[in-house]
Image (cartoon, rainbow, N blue to C red):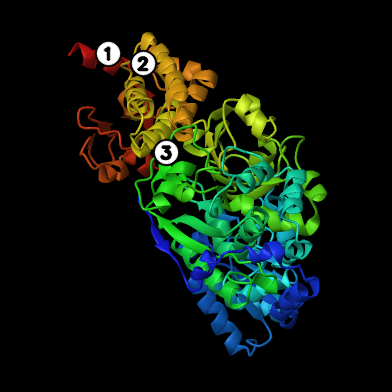
C-alpha cells in the first residue's frame, strides 16, 4: 500500500515559500505578457478549419490497434504528398470506447469507427483528397440502422454536455501548445491578476461545484477550510487513485488533457496558500496507469519550462509545483487519510473519523484533496463564470458529471452529462439501450460502494441527493448496466468480494463483517441458506455501515442492501424455491440437451473440457450430470439451440438425500 514519489525536474520549487505573493503587487501587464510569450506563436493550433486527422490514442483504442492506424496514416499521406498539408493528432480518449479504434476528420467532423489499417487509403482518397465519405465505414445507429457520418450528429455525442472532456479527442496530450491555443492557463493568469485568493474561493462557492470523487462535499467550502487552518505549509493533492472496477474517468482525463488538472491544482494552490505560506502539490496516481503517468509527467515538465509551474509562475511572484506519487493500487488508498499516509511512505490505512485532512492531512499539515474531475472543472469555471456553471444541473447538484458507462449496453464508453438527467436518458438515449433481445434489469452506480437500482427508477434524476435516497450513490462515476441474464445475488456478491478482499483490516466491522456477509451470499447462491440467514445478512450489513472506521467500509454493504431492497423476490427464490431465476448460480442449474433439436454435430462434445457430453456423430447427445462442471462451453458452441439451462431443484434435493 506504500507509494513511490516522483519529484521530477524543478520540483524543488515546490519547497520555496510563496510569501512573496502576499506583498508583491499583481502586475497584470507582466502576467499577460508572460502568458502571451507562451501562446502567441501557436494560435494556429486552435483553428478548426485546418485539415486534421484525429486518432484516438486512449487506453482502449491503444489496446485495439491505434498504433497500426497511425502507421498506415503516415504512410498513406507520405505516398500522396500530403504530409505537410494534413496535421495528424494522436488525442486522448474520444469516449466511444466500444467503437474503437476511432478516427475523426476535421474540419468536416467525419467519424470513422472500428477501423483497420487497410481502410486508411480509401478514407484519405475519399474524404481528404475528395469531398465524400466511405459509407461502409460509417457509424450505424444500433436502433434505427441509420448511417451517421458526422460525430456531432451521433446521439452518443450530441446528447452530452462536455466541460471536462471538451478537449479530449481534440488536442495532443503531449503538446502544451495545443492546450495553450485553446485558452489553456488563461484561468490561472486571470486569478493571478486579481491578486485576491478569497475571491477565487468565492467564485468556486458560487458555482456550486461539489467534489466529484464520491462524497460530493462543496469544493469552495473545503478550500476555505484548508486556507483558514493554520500550518507551516499547506498541501494540494489530486486523488487520481481510481480503484473502482470498470471505472476509467480520471485515467482518461489525465491521458487526454493533463494540463487541465495541473491548471486546476495551481488555481487551488493560489486560493489556499498564495498569502498563507508555502504550498506544495501532489498527484497520487496508481502505478497501473502507465499512459496517464507518462503524459502527466511530460505535461509537468513542459509547464515548468514555460513558466507555468514552479518558481514565479507567469512572472507573478507566486510559487507552486507538483510532484507525482505512484500508488501500489490498494483500493483503500482512495480514502483521504489512507492516501496521505501512503504518500508519507506508511501503510495506507484510514485514520479516525474525527481527523479532517483540511486540518491534519499530509505530514500533519492542512491539506486540500480533490479528485481529477473536480480540479479539471476549475479552469472552465474561472474562464466562463460561476453563473454559467451553476446554470447547469439541479438546485443542489451543479455542473456536469463524467460516467464510465459499461455492461450490457449497446454504446459503452466515457460520457459527460449535466447533473439531473435521468438514468433512462443516459442508458437508452446515449447508451443506445440494451443488447438485442435482452431486457433492462438494473444499473449499479458508484462502484463497489454503490447500489443496484431497478427499472422502476429509470426516470430518477442523476444527482447526489436522489441517488443516495434511492440507496445508491454518485461515487466517482462508475455505471454498470445489467440485463435479464444477470443474477442479482451473483452481481451483489461480485462487488462484495472486491471490497472484502480490499479491506485494509484495521476495523472489525469491515474486516470480519464483509467476510461473514460474503459467506451468507455464498450459501444463498448455492441454495443452502435459510430465511433467517437472509434476515441476518440485512442486520449484519447495517452493522457494517454503522461501525466501519472509514467511508469505504461503511459503504461496502450498499450493493447487498439495495439488492435486498429492490430484488428481494429474486433473493428469496434462491432460498425458498432453491432456484436461480437468471440461471446463473451453478449449484442451482443444470445443462441438458434437447434430443429433438440435437443434430449430433459434435460441437458441444469438442468444446466440453470435462468429457461430460456423450453421444455418437449424427446422433442425439446427452450430458452426464456427474461430470458436468457447468462451464457453459456447450451452450456457447451449439449452433442449433439444442443445449438447455434448467433450474436444478430436483437434482439438488436428490443430491442432498444422497
Label 2 neighbourhood size at 10 Å, few (<14), some (14-19), many (20+)? many
Of residue 223 and residue 656, the one placed in the foreground of this image is 223
**Are the residues at dot 2 and dot 1 in contact (C-beta closer than 8 Å)?**
yes
First in sequence: mark 3 vs mark 2: 3
Rendered image quadrant of residue 23:
bottom right
First in sequence: mark 2 vs mark 1: 2
| Residue 66 in sight in this render | no
Is 206 displayed left or right of 487 in the figure? right
Rendered image quadrant of residue 593:
top left
State the residue position of label 1: 653
Secondary element under disc 3, as helix, strand or loop, is loop
Judge depth for marks 3 and 2 and give the one in front. Answer: 3
Between the residue at mark 3 and the residue at mark 2, the CA separation in whole angstroms equals 40 Å
Judge depth for marks 1 and 3 and give the one in front. Answer: 3
**Are the residues at dot 3 and dot 2 in contact (C-beta closer than 8 Å)?**
no
Label 3 neighbourhood size at 10 Å, few (<14), some (14-19), many (20+)? many
Pinpoint residue 247: horizontal percent, then vertical percent.
Answer: 51, 47
Of residue 294 and residue 492, the one placed in the foreground of this image is 294
Between the residue at mark 1 and the residue at mark 3, the CA separation in whole angstroms equals 46 Å
State the residue position of label 2: 578
Secondary element under disc 1, as helix, strand or loop, is helix
Pinpoint residue 435: horizontal percent, then vertical percent.
Answer: 56, 41
- Label of residue 61 in the image: none
Between the residue at mark 2 and the residue at mark 1, the CA separation in whole angstroms equals 9 Å
Q: Quadrant of the C terminus?
A: top left
Q: What residue sits 45% from the left and 47% below the top?
A: 339
Is 568 displayed left or right of 208 in the figure? left
Secondary element under disc 2, as helix, strand or loop, is loop
Q: What residue sits 76% from the left and 52% below the top?
A: 199
State the residue position of label 3: 350
Amino acid at each position: 500500500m506504500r507509494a513511490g514519489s516522483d519529484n521530477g525536474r524543478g520540483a524543488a520549487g515546490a519547497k520555496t515559500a510563496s510569501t512573496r505573493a502576499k506583498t508583491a503587487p499583481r502586475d497584470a501587464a507582466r502576467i499577460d505578457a508572460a502568458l502571451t510569450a507562451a501562446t502567441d506563436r501557436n494560435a494556429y493550433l486552435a483553428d478548426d478549419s485546418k485539415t486534421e486527422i484525429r486518432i484516438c490514442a486512449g487506453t482502449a483504442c491503444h489496446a485495439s490497434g491505434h498504433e497500426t492506424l497511425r502507421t498506415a496514416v503516415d504512410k498513406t499521406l507520405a505516398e500522396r504528398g500530403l504530409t505537410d498539408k494534413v496535421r495528424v493528432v494522436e488525442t486522448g480518449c474520444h469516449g466511444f470506447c466500444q467503437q474503437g479504434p476511432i478516427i475523426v476528420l476535421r474540419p468536416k467532423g467525419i467519424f470513422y469507427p472500428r477501423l483497420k489499417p487497410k481502410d486508411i487509403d480509401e478514407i484519405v482518397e475519399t474524404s481528404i483528397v475528395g469531398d465524400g465519405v466511405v459509407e461502409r465505414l460509417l457509424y450505424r445507429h444500433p436502433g434505427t440502422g441509420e448511417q451517421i457520418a458526422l460525430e456531432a450528429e451521433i446521439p452518443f455525442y450530441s446528447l452530452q454536455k462536455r466541460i471536462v472532456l471538451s478537449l479530449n479527442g481534440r488536442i495532443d496530450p503531449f503538446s502544451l501548445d495545443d492546450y495553450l491555443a485553446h485558452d489553456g492557463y488563461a484561468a490561472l493568469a486571470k486569478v493571478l491578476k486579481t491578486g485576491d485568493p478569497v475571491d477565487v474561493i468565492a467564485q468556486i462557492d458560487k458555482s456550486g461545484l461539489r467534489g466529484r470523487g464520491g462524497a460530493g462535499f462543496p469544493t469552495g467550502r473545503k478550500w476555505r477550510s484548508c486556507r483558514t487552518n493554520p500550518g507551516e505549509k499547506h498541501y494540494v493533492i489530486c486523488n487520481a487513485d481510481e480503484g473502482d472496477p470498470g471505472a476509467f474517468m480520471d485515467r482518461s482525463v489525465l491521458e487526454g488533457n493533463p494540463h487541465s488538472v495541473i491548471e486546476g491544482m495551481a488555481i487551488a494552490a493560489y486560493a489556499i496558500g498564495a498569502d498563507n505560506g508555502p504550498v506544495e502539490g501532489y498527484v497520487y496516481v496508481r502505478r497501473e496507469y502507465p499512459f496517464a503517468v507518462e503524459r502527466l509527467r511530460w505535461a509537468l515538465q513542459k509547464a515548468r519550462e514555460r513558466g507555468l509551474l514552479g518558481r514565479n509562475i507567469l512572472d507573478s511572484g507566486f510559487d507552486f509545483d507538483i510532484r507525482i506519487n505512484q500508488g501500489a493500487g490498494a483500493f483503500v488508498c482512495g480514502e483521504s487519510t489512507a492516501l496521505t499516509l501512503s504518500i508519507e511512505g506508511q501503510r495506507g490505512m484510514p485514520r479516525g473519523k474525527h481527523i479532517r485532512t483540511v486540518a491534519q492531512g499530509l505530514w500533519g499539515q492542512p491539506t486540500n484533496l480533490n479528485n481529477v474531475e473536480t480540479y479539471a472543472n476549475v479552469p472552465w469555471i474561472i474562464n466562463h463564470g460561476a453563473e454559467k456553471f451553476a446554470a447547469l444541473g439541479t438546485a443542489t447538484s451543479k455542473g456536469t458529471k463524467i460516467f464510465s458507462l459499461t455492461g450490457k449496453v449497446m454504446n459503452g464508453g466515457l460520457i459527460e452529462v449535466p447533473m439531473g438527467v435521468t438514468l433512462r436518458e443516459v442508458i437508452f438515449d446515449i447508451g443506445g439501450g440494451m443488447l438485442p433481445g435482452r431486457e433492462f434489469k438494473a444499473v449499479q452506480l458508484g462502484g463497489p460502494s454503490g447500489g443496484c437500482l431497478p427499472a422502476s427508477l429509470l426516470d430518477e434524476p442523476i444527482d447526489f441527493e436522489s441517488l443516495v435516497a434511492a440507496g445508491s450513490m454518485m461515487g466517482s462515476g462508475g455505471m454498470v448496466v445489467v440485463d435479464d441474464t444477470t443474477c442479482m445475488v451473483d452481481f451483489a456478491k461480485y462487488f462484495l468480494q472486491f471490497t472484502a478482499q480490499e479491506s485494509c483490516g484495521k476495523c472489525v466491522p469491515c474486516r470480519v463483517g464483509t467476510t461473514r456477509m460474503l459467506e451468507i451470499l455464498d450459501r444463498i447462491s448455492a441454495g443452502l441458506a435459510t430465511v433467517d440467514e437472509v434476515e441476518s445478512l440485512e442486520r449484519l450489513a447495517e452493522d457494517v455501515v454503522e461501525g466501519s472506521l472509514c467511508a469505504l467500509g461503511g459503504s461496502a454493504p450498499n450493493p447487498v442492501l439495495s439488492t435486498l431492497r429492490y430484488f428481494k423476490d429474486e433473493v428469496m427464490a434462491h432460498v425458498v424455491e432453491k432456484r436461480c431465476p437468471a440461471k446463473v448460480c451453478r449449484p442451482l442449474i443444470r445443462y441438458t440437451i434437447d434430443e429433438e433439436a440435437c443434430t449430433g454435430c459434435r460441437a458441444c462434445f469438442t468444446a466440453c473440457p470435462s468429457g461430460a457430453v456423450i453421444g455418437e456423430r449424427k446422433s442425439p447427445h446427452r450430458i452426464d450430470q456427474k461430470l458436468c462442471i457447468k462451464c457453459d462451453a456447450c451452450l456457447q458452441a451449439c449452433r442449433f439451440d439444442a443445449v438447455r439451462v434448467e433450474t436444478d431443484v430436483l437434482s439438488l434435493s436428490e443430491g442432498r438425500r444422497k
